[in-house]
C-alpha cells in the first residue's frame, strides 16, 4: 500500500533525504556537454578526477591504463552506489531493492564462469572485478582457485545469496557445456526473479514498477529482433523470453510468428516507438542491432527522469535514483567510447539525447 503524509515521512524521510544528497553530487548536463565537446580522452579523465568518480579512476594505475580500464572504474562506482542504496532503503522493502540492483553482482559471477571456462587465472581478471559486499574479490579469488567450473559454482553458492540463479546456471552448464548459454540463463533467471517482485513494487510505486517492466520488455524485444534478423523460429526463442514485461510472452511470440520480416515485427511493438530506429537500422551499412537498443534505452531513461521528478517521500525516489545513476554512467561510457572509436558528434548525441 502506498503511504502518504506522516506515514510516508516517517518511513522514507531519511532515505529520501540521502537520495537528494547523493543526487546533488551527480554530474550536471553542463558537465556532460563539456566532456562531449572535448576530444582528448586524457582531458576528459582529468575532468572526471575533479568529481566523485576520482577514487574509482585512481584505482587503475597511470593515465594510459586508466583510459583502457575506465569502463571498469565506472562499473565499480555503480556497484558502490548499489550498496549505498541498499543501506538507506527501509528494512521492510530492502529485498526488493536488492533484486533491482544485484545485476552488478551477476556481472562478477559471469566473469568468473567465463574465465574458468577459458582456463584463465584470478590474476588475469582481478582488475576487471566490480567488487561488492555480496560478491567480493576474496570470494571470487577463492572460486577461481577451484579445480573446475562445478566446484567454482559450489563456492559461489556457499558464499553469495544467489543460490537459485547459480543452481540453474550449473544445470545449464552440465547439459550444454556452453558458457555463453550459461551466462544467458543467468540473465534470464535474474530478470525472471525481478519480475516476481513487480507486484509488490507496484503497490509501493506504480511508476517504479513500470520502469522495471520496461527494462524487461526491452530485453524481450531485443531478443525477438535478433531472432528475426537471423531467421530463428518462434518455438526456439520462446524459452529466452522473460515474463512480467509490458507484453506477455504469448503475445510476443504470436506477434513474432505473424511478422514476415523486421519491419512487420517493429510495427507490432507497442511498448516502444521504434519507427525512427528502424529507418536508421535500414540505412546502416552493418545493420547494427544496437540502434534498436539505444532507442529503447532512451525511452526508459526518459521515464526514469520523469519518475524521479514526481516522486516525493516514496520508495519510487530510491528506485529512480539508482536508475538515474545508471543513466549517468551509460552516458559517460557512450561519450568516452565514442571519442575513442572516432564516432561523429551527431552519432554520440543520438545515443544519449536525453542527457544532452
Image: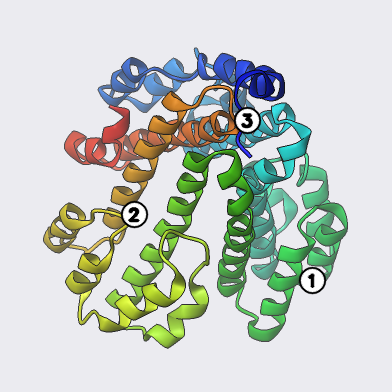
Task: Where is residue 204? Give x, y as percent.
Answer: 60, 39
Left or right of residue 231, residue 283 in this image? left
Residue named by callout 1? 148
Asked whether the viewer can see residue 230, the reply is no
Cα separation between marks 3 and 1:
50 Å
190 is higher (above) or lower (below) than 147: above
Disc 3 target residue: 3
**Labelled disc at residue 218:** none
* Residue 141 location (% of width, % of height): 80, 51
Which quadrant would residue 110 be assigned to in this image?
bottom right
Could you tell me how many numbered marks the image carries?
3
Q: Is residue 271 left or right of residue 13?
A: left
Q: Nearer the viewer, residue 207 or 18?
A: 207
Residue at x-position 71% and y-position 19%: 10
- Which quadrant, please, contains the N terminus? top right
**In this view of the protein, can residue 195 be seen by the observer?**
yes
Q: Position of residue 193 (x, y in %)?
A: 64, 60
Q: Nearer the viewer, mark 2 or mark 3?
A: 3
Q: Secondary structure at mark 2?
A: helix
**Mark 1 residue crowding within 10 angstroms, few (<14) / some (14–19) / many (20+):** some
**Label 2, label 1: how far apart the Cα atoms are:** 35 Å
- The C terminus lies in which quarter of the figure? top left
Q: Nearer the viewer, residue 5 or 148?
A: 5
User: Toward the viewer: 157 or 147?
Assistant: 157
Residue to which mark 2 is pinned: 293
Amino acid at each position: 500500500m502506498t503511504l502518504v503524509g506522516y506515514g510516508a515521512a516517517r518511513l522514507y524521510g531519511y532515505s529520501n533525504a540521502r537520495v537528494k544528497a547523493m543526487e546533488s553530487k551527480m554530474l550536471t548536463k553542463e558537465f556532460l556537454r563539456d566532456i562531449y565537446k572535448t576530444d582528448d580522452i586524457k582531458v576528459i579523465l582529468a575532468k572526471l578526477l575533479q568529481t566523485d568518480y576520482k577514487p574509482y579512476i585512481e584505482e587503475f594505475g597511470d593515465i594510459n591504463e586508466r583510459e583502457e580500464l575506465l569502463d571498469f572504474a565506472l562499473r565499480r562506482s555503480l556497484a558502490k552506489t548499489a550498496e549505498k542504496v541498499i543501506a538507506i532503503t527501509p528494512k521492510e522493502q530492502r529485498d526488493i531493492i536488492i533484486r533491482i540492483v544485484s545485476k552488478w553482482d551477476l556481472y562478477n559471477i559471469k566473469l568468473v564462469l567465463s574465465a574458468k571456462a577459458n582456463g584463465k587465472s584470478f590474476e588475469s581478471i582481478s582488475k576487471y572485478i566490480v567488487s561488492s559486499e555480496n560478491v567480493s574479490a576474496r570470494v571470487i579469488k577463492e572460486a577461481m582457485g577451484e579445480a573446475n567450473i562445478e566446484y567454482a559454482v559450489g563456492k559461489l553458492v556457499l558464499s553469495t545469496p544467489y543460490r537459485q540463479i547459480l543452481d540453474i546456471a550449473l544445470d545449464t552448464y552440465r547439459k550444454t557445456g556452453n558458457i555463453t548459454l550459461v551466462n544467458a540463463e543467468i540473465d534470464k533467471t535474474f530478470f525472471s526473479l525481478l519480475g516476481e517482485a513487480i507486484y509488490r513494487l507496484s503497490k509501493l510505486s506504480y511508476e517504479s514498477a513500470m520502469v522495471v517492466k520496461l527494462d524487461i520488455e526491452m530485453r524481450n524485444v531485443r531478443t525477438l529482433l535478433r531472432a528475426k534478423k537471423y531467421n530463428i523460429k518462434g518455438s526456439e526463442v520462446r524459452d529466452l523470453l522473460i515474463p512480467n514485461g509490458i507484453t506477455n510472452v504469448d503475445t510476443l511470440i504470436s506477434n513474432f510468428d505473424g511478422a514476415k520480416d523486421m519491419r512487420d515485427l517493429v510495427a507490432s511493438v507497442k511498448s516502444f516507438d521504434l519507427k525512427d530506429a528502424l529507418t536508421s537500422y535500414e540505412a546502416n551499412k552493418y545493420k547494427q542491432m544496437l540502434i534498436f537498443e539505444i532507442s529503447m534505452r532512451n525511452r526508459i531513461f526518459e521515464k526514469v527522469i520523469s519518475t524521479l521528478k514526481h516522486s516525493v517521500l516514496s520508495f519510487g525516489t530510491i528506485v529512480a535514483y539508482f536508475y538515474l545513476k545508471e543513466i549517468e554512467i551509460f552516458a559517460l561510457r557512450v561519450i568516452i567510447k565514442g571519442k575513442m572509436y572516432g564516432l561523429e558528434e551527431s552519432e554520440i548525441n543520438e545515443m544519449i539525447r536525453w542527457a544532452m
